[in-house]
Amino acid sequence: MNIMEDFLKEPQIPDAYLKKSDEELTNEGWRLRRELGAQVYIPGHHYQRDEVIRFADDRGDSLRLAQLSAQKKEAEYIVFCGVHFMAETADILTDDRQKVILPDQRAGCAMADMANIYQLERAWKKLQDTFGDTIIPMTYINSTAEIKAFCGRHGGATVTSSNADKMMQWAFSQKERILFLPDQHLGRNTGVKLGVPLEEMVVWNPVQDRFEGEATNRTRVILWKGFCTVHEKFTAKNVAACRKADPEVRVLVHPECDYEVVRQADYVGSTKYIIEMINQAPEGSHWAIGTEMNLVNRLKHDRPDLDIRLLNPVMCSCLTMNRIDLPHFVWSLTRIADGEPENIIKVPKTVANGAVLALKRMLEQS
């Protein structure tokens, strides 16, 4: 089932929740949290709203939160404060008796939606016709369960922004070429880091069903034309403007950013890396950070002794991450307390089995 089908079947949140004040909802949220106790586990992604993530039992990236959910054997319900593909991964890794709930089914991921299984199956046939059996499919964790399952069934694996270089090295030990889904920027930046020249990479456009550029015998990395709608908005001009305004600034960005932004940054790394860099930063240092706004604002609040700014000053937060708001969160807890949980995310067993293969191959290399 895709996100749109989920949304069409989603029960509508009662207007009463939308009319309550944040204070009322917060108080109700804490009351329900105490009432439900260990029956509920609440993982919260770093990009979530402050008013929601305060309820999280753990904060982290998508894979870490899914792994933690699987460890909470006493929790019958996992109320995942994140987006759809994250809840899918949690469902794949948790026990059958555990139910993963996404408070708002509209909380999708634009990047994950840029690669669907129909596009991939069609592309795979054409890529096999072009290159033969020389390609291994690799997918960023920010992808649907069906994409993960395809990679699992075809000998590939998942990657995270923390281990992409290690996983790409592993992939090259398996096959001559890599199809990297769905984020072209992470694939390109990782390839360059490993010494793959740009001329040995080519972009596959799944909408037009063709290569953008020339695919040759030298092609080693095929980049799916997908991207993060937040990180792609950071530009090389932003980097230049920050350096001109403040010569002392250190530019710290996520590898989902454009190649030129990554090339000109001082530091590049995953969300975890960004948080650790700021936590360890010397007092008084200046930072321009290229990642999601909610996280940057939280880092700024936690380290008032630093000069922290968003790399692009006119950015907004991730719209799909912000779908998980207080009304939907409290409504989800209420439905659990009433014994009628809503918005349960369930990955079909046949899909989950393939996705597990892709995840296991990654974890074996970690």
Image: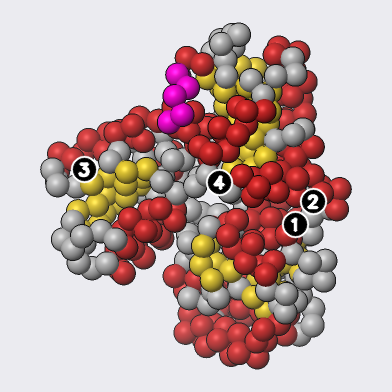
Task: Label 4: state its secondary structure.
Answer: loop
Q: Is residue 284 left or right of residue 314?
A: left
Q: Is residue 188 above or below residue 22?
A: above
Which amino acid type is marked by label 2? Ala
- Confirm whether the magenta stretch covers residue 162: no
Q: Tell which circle, 2 or 3, labels the residue nearer the N-terminal end.
A: 3
Q: Tell me: 47 left or right of 304.
A: right
Q: Name which residue lies at 51% across and 54% down.
A: 319
- CA distance separating discs 1 and 3: 42 Å
Q: Nearer the viewer, mark 4 or mark 3?
A: 4
Q: CA distance from mark 2 to mark 4?
A: 18 Å
> Which corner quadrant of the image does residue 127 belong to?
top right
**Residue at the spot of label 4:** 160
Which numbered disc flags the more N-terminal residue, 2 or 4? 4
Task: Find numbered disc 2 in the image and state the secondary structure of the residue it sits on.
Answer: helix
Q: Which mark is residue 92?
A: 1
| Labels 2 and 3 touching (C-beta < 8 A) | no
Q: Which mark is residue 242?
A: 3
- What x and y, as percent, mark residue 96? 82, 66
> Mark 3 packing: few (<14 Cα in 10 Å), some, or many (20+)?
many
> Which quadrant holds residue 136?
top right
Region rendered in magenta:
193-198
Distance, label 4 to label 3, CA atoms, is: 28 Å
Q: Which residue: 48% across, 80% down?
A: 22
User: Could you say which disc has been placed on residue 352 in the image?
Assistant: 2
**Outermost residue to the right:** 350
Q: Residue at x 20, y 66 (%)?
A: 305
* Three-letter amino acid code of the residue under disc 1: Ile
Crowdedness near tag 2: few (<14), some (14–19) or many (≥20) residues, C-alpha within 10 Å: many
Q: Earlier in the sequence, mark 4 or mark 3?
A: 4
